[in-house]
Image: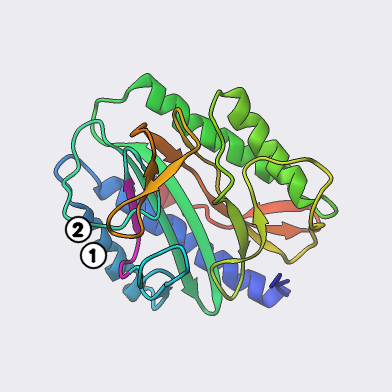
């Protein structure tokens, strides 16, 4: 299903997007050396409840997972890149943490992810990898305008990632959002321009470049959810929800100024 939102629903989507971004920034501030992943999940749960919003993850049970996810946020550490299931792990100096969050508020979903390094020990290669996903995300957003095609976004993202030297996995990527979390169209992180669905105002898309340092192969943890690099290499993931407008792409998952400080 491809869902086109009217102006009223788009306004609600802006509120949802800000909520998601603010929660992620709050979790980034709280995630320090000694923080447990289950604490991050509990803090996220409370912020969602306080906002009278609904988690998109707790009851989520897709074909690629094993049973309901059962948690409020994805916490992927180091070689984990997607769908990291919170568990009893205490963050250490130098860990590379990705937080991925999707929430529904007033009937509209927003989805976003950030990667960052815990503590003071930041390896240059980790910083460069995170930067590559952020630059690829910006390139995909810049390519998103009415009349452009999904392939244009995929090509823009893939060009940045490839030029940065990263292999690209096409099993998981961006997607449409709206009244539900995962909708068509699927947006792979590499592709040919001029191909695929033509963008139109009112379409909401979650763009999410993600990479693994030296492989495009994934392995699944025993928890049935957490996806890791097959080689044990570090990973990074950046994501925004955008709305296609008459003037181009509007990023919905930007934090308020106070949350970003």
Picture coordinates of residue 166, whole percent (x, y): 53, 28
Q: Is residue 71 magenta?
A: yes
Residue at screen point 50% across, 37% down: 216
Q: Looking at this rendering, what residue extends furthest in the top direction?
A: 124
Q: Pick the quarter of the image with the N terminus.
A: bottom right
Badge 1: residue crowd in 10 Å (few <14, some 14–19, many ≥20)? some
Work out whether residue 4 or residue 64 is closer to the camera in this orientation and state it: 64
- Compared with 4, 213 (above or below) is above
Residue at screen point 54% across, 51% down: 172
Q: Examine the image and state in which quarter residue 97 appears.
A: top left
Q: Which mark is residue 39?
A: 2
Q: Which mark is residue 12?
A: none
Q: Is residue 206 visible?
A: no
Q: In what element is the residue under mark 1?
A: helix
Write the start and end of the magenta stretch as one range.
Answer: 70-76
Badge 2: residue crowd in 10 Å (few <14, some 14–19, many ≥20)? some
- Compared with 118, 113 (above or below) is below
Q: In what element is the residue under mark 2?
A: helix
| Side of 66 where 34 appears, left or right | left
Instruction: Verify CB contact (< 8 Å) between mark 1 and mark 2.
Output: yes
Work out whether residue 172 or residue 253 is closer to the camera in this orientation and state it: 172
Q: Is residue 146 magenta?
A: no
Residue at screen point 37% across, 58% down: 23
In this figure, which residue is indicated by the disc labeled 1? 42
Q: Is residue 8 visible?
A: yes
- Compared with 22, 35 (above or below) is above
């Amino acid at each position: 299903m491809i869902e086109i939102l009217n102006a009223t629903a788009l306004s609600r989507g802006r509120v949802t997007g800000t909520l998601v971004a603010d929660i992620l920034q709050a979790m980034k501030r709280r995630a320090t050396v000694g923080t447990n992943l289950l604490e991050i999940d509990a803090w996220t749960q409370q912020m969602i409840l306080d906002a009278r919003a609904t988690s998109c993850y707790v009851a989520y049970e897709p074909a690629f997972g094993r049973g309901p996810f059962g948690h409020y946020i994805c916490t992927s550490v180091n070689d984990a890149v997607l769908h990291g299931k919170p568990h009893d792990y205490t963050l250490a100096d130098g860990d590379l943490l990705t937080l991925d969050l999707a929430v529904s508020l007033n009937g509209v979903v927003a989805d976003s992810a950030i990667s960052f390094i815990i503590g003071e020990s930041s390896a240059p290669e980790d910083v460069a990898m995170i930067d590559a996903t952020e630059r690829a995300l910006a390139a995909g957003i810049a390519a998103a305008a009415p009349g452009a095609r999904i392939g244009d976004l995929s090509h823009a993202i893939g060009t940045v990632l490839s030029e940065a030297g990263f292999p690209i996995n096409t099993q998981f990527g961006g997607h449409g959002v709206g009244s539900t979390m995962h909708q068509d169209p699927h947006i792979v992180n590499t592709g040919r321009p001029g191909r695929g669905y033509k963008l139109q105002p009112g379409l909401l898309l979650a763009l999410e470049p993600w990479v693994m340092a030296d492989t495009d192969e994934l392995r699944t943890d025993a928890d049935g959810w957490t996806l890791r690099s097959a080689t044990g290499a570090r990973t990074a993931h950046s994501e925004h929800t955008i709305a296609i407008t008459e003037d181009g792409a509007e990023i919905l998952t930007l934090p308020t100024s106070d949350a970003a400080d």
